[in-house]
Image (cartoon, rainbow, N blue to C red):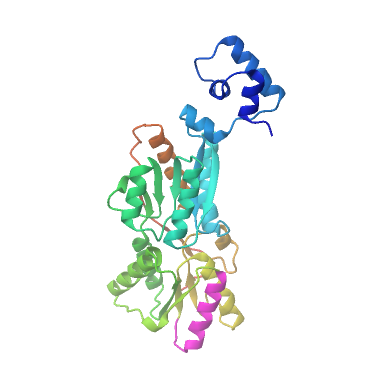
Amino acid sequence: MTTIKDIARIANVSVATVSRVANKGPKVGDKTRLRVQKLMDDMGYKPNANARALVTNTNTTIGVIVPDISDPFFAALAQGVDNIARENKMQLLISTCSIDAESEKNAINLLQERQCRSIIFHSKKMSDDELAHLCASIPGLILINRNIEAYPERCIWLDNIEGGKIAARHLASLNHKNIACISSKYEIEDPADRLKGFVDELSLHQLTMNSELIVYCAPNQLGGEEAAQQLISSGKGFTSIFVYNDAMAIGAISTLEDNGIRVPRDVSIIGFDDVLLSQYSRPKLTTLAYPIVQMAEDAARLSIQLIADENPKSSKNRYLPRLIRRESTADC
């Protein structure tokens, strides 16, 4: 592969001169520029994108950090960022991490090593102080699904507490009183906030949540299946289940149906996120719509504006979920 040093040696110029020609920089005579450009074309030399970004101070890539790109929710998040990247003729870089602080740090370091200045970061385990330090050092860093006090203007987040309240109001309106909950086993804000909002709203309807009917499992379809089996095995009666996300809800429906418990005739199910699969489950899933694509697009636009030293237009930082009523909930 031809390198910048090869071009400089054959053209008998400095590496700096070749770099200026490659990046359309100043201080190169016309004859030298034409000669070096012809050599680059003839030898198939392609400038390094990261090096070009450093020389021209342009932002050519936008990064996104998510825990699991195979999860439909995080795939939608990445798609939203990519939509804005394409509009701005930028490339998308995806870095994945586990739900732990060290993995999140490694993921953001990887993007920084690739000279990525615009980064949309879905962080759940790094501390607020650590994230504030990153915001101070990376002007284009936007936190999605996180709200930290030091940099509220860099945070795009969903009000999960309100989402829990909406779910509780819906089930209460259908006269459900014995309600179970399937939540995520991860000790992060989202499931805790959704459950808090749900329990708080139930109390306004003179309803209480039986702690024995709250089950914690992995936030995927298998976790939903396992959680539903635990609820059935408990022997406790319930007529509805509030589920942390749609993947778990779809898994729970499968287990209930396999055990002869029909949804929604015997048990109503309400999920959260409104991923594409929720429209195709049987029955179609009642859920809370999470505007993650819009949030990701807004986060990407904000990041690009900050990198360009523009005064960002007044942006919406707090988003609200919306009830999508389908077939999996019914009157008790």
Residue beneath the point at 32% across and 56% down: 128
218 vs 159: above or below: below
Furthest-right residue in this view: 42
Looking at the rendered image, the quarter that the N terminus falls into is top right
| Res. 290 in view | no
| Res. 78 in view | yes
Furthest-bottom residue in this view: 235
247 vs 56: above or below: below
Q: Quadrant of the rendered structure where residue 281 is?
A: bottom right
38 vs 299: above or below: above
Q: Position of residue 246 (x, y in %)?
A: 51, 65
Q: Position of residue 262 (x, y in %)?
A: 56, 78
Left or right: 49 in relation to 164: right
Q: Position of residue 321 (x, y in %)?
A: 41, 57
Q: Return the residue nearer the eye: 305 or 329.
A: 305
Residue beneath the point at 35% across and 46% down: 135
Residue beneath the point at 59% across and 83% down: 259
- Count numbered badges in the picture: 0
Residue beneath the point at 46% across and 50% down: 108
Left or right: 46 in relation to 237: right
Q: Position of residue 94 (x, y in %)?
A: 54, 49
Q: Is residue 6 magenta?
A: no
Looking at the rendered image, the quarter that the C terminus falls into is bottom left
* Magenta portion: prevailing SS class: helix
Q: Is residue 233 magenta?
A: yes
Q: Return the residue nearer the eye: 97 or 324.
A: 97
Q: Quadrant of the rendered structure where residue 147 is?
A: bottom left
51 vs 202: above or below: above
Q: Return the residue nearer the eye: 288 or 73.
A: 73
Start and end of the magenta stretch? 221-238
